[in-house]
Image: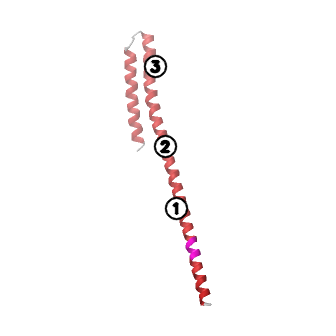
Amino acid sequence: MIEDLSKNNDSDQIKNSSERLVSETSNQDDELKRKKKSGQKQVIRSIGYITQIGITIAATIMLGVFLGRILDNWLGTSPWLLLFFSLLGMAAAIKALFEMSNTKK
């Protein structure tokens, strides 16, 4: 009879240990899944930020070139306004980059 109680206690302890192990393993799996999702969100945010930088640079410079060409054709001042507005577009791109870098910190 004492042996039966001892065997029951051992089997209960083994059962409790295995349940605890399964519970801890599932908690670790859940934590790994959360970290993976968090990492994926960070990658998507980074890609969006890089895309925003590229579009900002391209748009400001192209706008400067476009305005320069239109004004040069209209006023007959062939390369000068194109150069001026191209440089102005580059300066605007640099200013926008500084503003973006300050707001993302």
CB atoms at circles 2 and 1 under 8 Å apart? no
Q: Amino acid at mark 1?
A: Gln
Q: Which residue is mark 3?
A: 66
User: How far across and down, in percent of the image, does residue 39 sit?
Assistant: 49, 49
Three-letter code for the amino acid on which mark 3 is drawn = Phe
- Quarter of the image containing the N terminus? bottom right
Q: Is residue 77 above or below residue 99?
A: above
Task: Report which residue position mark 2 lands on.
Answer: 45
Would you name the residue on which mark 1 appears?
28
> What whole-number distance in Å separates the C-alpha atoms at marks 1 and 3?
57 Å
Measured as percent of width and height from the top left, residue 75 is found at 42, 10
Nearer the camera: disc 3 or disc 2: 2
Question: Which badge, 1 or 3, comes first in the chain's sequence?
Answer: 1
SS for tag 2? helix
Where 16 sits versus 48, above or below?
below
Q: CA distance from mark 3 to mark 2?
A: 31 Å
Percent from the top left, x then y, of residue 71?
44, 14
